[in-house]
């Protein structure tokens, strides 16, 4: 008999992104030095000023972005990471290095997509490692300016499963709230919290399960009641909701079109779908054109059924996508 | 090495013996899955043959009506869906849920490793 088990044997991985000065190095120092009872291997693209002598601190060398599948944009992977993760896996199997988790620090200018895609495209990596979450650090004092000036900073926010806002003690409440409102418009699904690097609990960084299809889609309250439009962002998120069930084959065709036409601009999407004729939720998630669906929890008799999907992307035609999804609802 | 070729290497009796020709990678995957599930004891080979024969009979009827019948591996896949449901390995709802993303993204663009819970044999 086949039984489901909770034990996923793969090594969990956290991707830590954030712009210069947001405090990634401080955080990494804590991960490496603090006695938190975990053996965490840290991969950096280039050694910073940490100056730590630690066998768990590794340098992946220069970023090597490789296009798989005939140059398809969503199939780019970081070959430098593939190499070092395979090497780490071998050392772990040979018992020459012990670790339970991996944290990858990306440079401030790195595009998070190829880093994340590495875990979904490369067979060896996807079998040995589980991407837990993308965590993005934002500097409360310089966040607005960095988001204005660098599209990479915006993409790091769009990709995040969790946003940590640092240095909130250096700004007043109005500045902090305005930044948080802006981040929320860009990413409606990532929980956001202020961090103090001296005390941030490790639990805020580990086991976020951002790519886990079982994670309930929890949208941050206040997302739809937003009135600060000072920054008209190219990157933003929107939430689609419907109570009527979807017709599966219409939805398949429509999502195929969305992935084909808007995939490169669609950073993350995640949702729970109510599909006609299926007694359980279908959970959906995607990164650019890469997508997966699975059966989720059963609808109970006394709960209202409905679909909720959040889309995060650049210049997405929101009205068109909404109308298209409405067109996939089953006629009753 | 891709996952389907790995699966196939494990499933095929040995090199040279196999006179199996696949037109598409999914055909090899479907073939290898059935061989492996049978080997792992989820159903016997005669049970599979019986299940597959029903699909072949259906295809023959379709052809007899002058309509284009499903291809050999489409018949194989239809039988595979039925036997995994009959044996309680996956429900029709599970298959439909998986199919949604595969149909929308295309086989090359399925997020690998986004499995929810691994299945183990008890």
Image: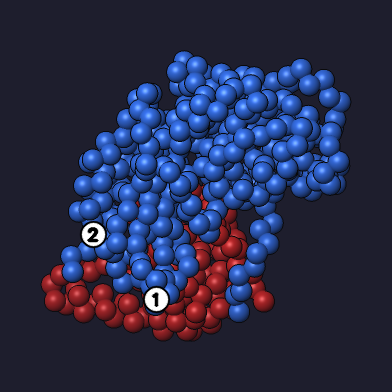
Chain colours: A blue, B red
Question: Which of the labelled discs sits on residue A329, or is there none?
Answer: 2
Residue A37 in view? yes
* Residue A222 lies in quadrant: top left
Kindly indicate whether the residue at mark 1 contacts the one at mark 2 (C-beta within 8 angstroms).
Answer: no
Query: Which residue does the image show at 31% across and 77% down from the upper left?
Result: B56
Q: Is residue A101 left or right of residue A286?
A: right
Quick one: which residue is furthest to the left in this view? B66
- Depth check, mark 2 against mark 1: the one in front is 1
In the rendered image, which residue does mark 1 sit on? A302
Q: Position of residue B17 (x, y in %)?
A: 54, 63
A65 and A291: which is toward the camera: A291
- Chain under label 1? A
Residue depicted at 64% across the width and 40% down the height: A14
Q: Say whether residue A152 is left or right of residue B107.
A: right
Please report the residue visible at 50 percent of the width from the left and 36 percent of the height from the top: A159
Residue B110: mark: none
- Closer to the camera, A39 or A163? A163
A70 vs A255: above or below: above
**Considering only order in the chain, which callout, 1 or 2, is on the residue closer to the N terminus?**
1
Q: CA distance from mark 2 to mark 1?
A: 22 Å
Residue A151 % position (x, y):
45, 21
Q: Position of residue A82 (x, y in %)?
A: 63, 36
Label 2: element kind: loop
């Amino acid at each position: 008999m086949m039984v489901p088990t909770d034990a996923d044997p793969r090594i969990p991985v956290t991707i830590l992104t954030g712009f210069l000065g947001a405090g990634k190095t401080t955080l990494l120092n804590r991960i490496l030095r603090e006695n938190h009872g975990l053996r965490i291997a840290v991969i950096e693209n280039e050694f910073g000023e940490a100056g730590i002598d630690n066998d768990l601190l590794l340098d992946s060398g220069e970023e090597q972005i490789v296009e798989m599948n005939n140059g398809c944009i969503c199939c780019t992977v970081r070959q430098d990471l593939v190499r070092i993760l395979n090497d780490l896996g071998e050392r772990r199997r040979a018992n020459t290095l012990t670790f339970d988790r991996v944290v990858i620090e990306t440079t401030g200018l790195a595009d998070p997509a190829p880093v994340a895609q590495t875990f979904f495209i490369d067979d060896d990596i996807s079998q040995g490692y589980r991407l837990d979450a993308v965590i993005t650090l934002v500097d409360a004092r310089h966040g607005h300016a960095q988001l204005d000036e660098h599209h990479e900073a915006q993409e790091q926010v769009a990709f995040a499963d969790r946003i940590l806002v640092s240095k909130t003690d250096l700004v007043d409440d109005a500045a902090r709230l305005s930044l948080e409102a802006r981040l929320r418009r860009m990413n409606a699904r990532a929980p956001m919290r202020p961090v103090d690097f001296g005390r941030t609990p490790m639990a805020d960084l580990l086991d976020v399960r951002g790519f886990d299809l079982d994670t309930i889609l929890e949208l941050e309250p206040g997302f739809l009641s937003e009135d600060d439009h000072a920054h008209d962002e190219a990157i933003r998120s929107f939430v689609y909701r419907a109570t009527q069930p979807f017709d599966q084959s219409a939805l398949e065709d429509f999502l195929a079109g969305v992935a084909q036409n808007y995939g490169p601009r669609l950073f993350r999407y995640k949702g729970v779908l109510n599909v006609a004729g299926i007694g359980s939720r279908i959970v959906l998630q995607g990164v650019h054109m890469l997508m997966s669906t699975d059966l989720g929890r059963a609808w109970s008799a006394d709960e209202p059924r409905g679909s909720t999907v959040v889309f995060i992307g650049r210049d997405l035609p929101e009205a068109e996508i909404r109308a298209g999804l409405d067109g996939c609802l089953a006629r009753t | 090495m891709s996952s389907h070729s790995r699966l196939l290497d494990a499933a095929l009796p040995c090199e040279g013996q196999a006179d199996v020709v696949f037109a598409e990678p999914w055909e090899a995957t479907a073939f290898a899955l059935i061989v492996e599930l049978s080997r792992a004891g989820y159903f016997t080979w005669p049970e599979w043959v019986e299940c597959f024969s029903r699909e072949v009979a259906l295809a023959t009827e379709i052809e007899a009506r002058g309509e284009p019948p499903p291809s050999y591996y489409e018949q194989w896949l239809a039988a595979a869906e039925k036997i995994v449901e009959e044996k309680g390995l996956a429900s029709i709802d599970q298959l439909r849920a998986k199919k949604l993303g595969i149909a929308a993204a295309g086989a090359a663009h399925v997020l690998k490793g986004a499995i929810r819970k691994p299945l183990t044999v008890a």
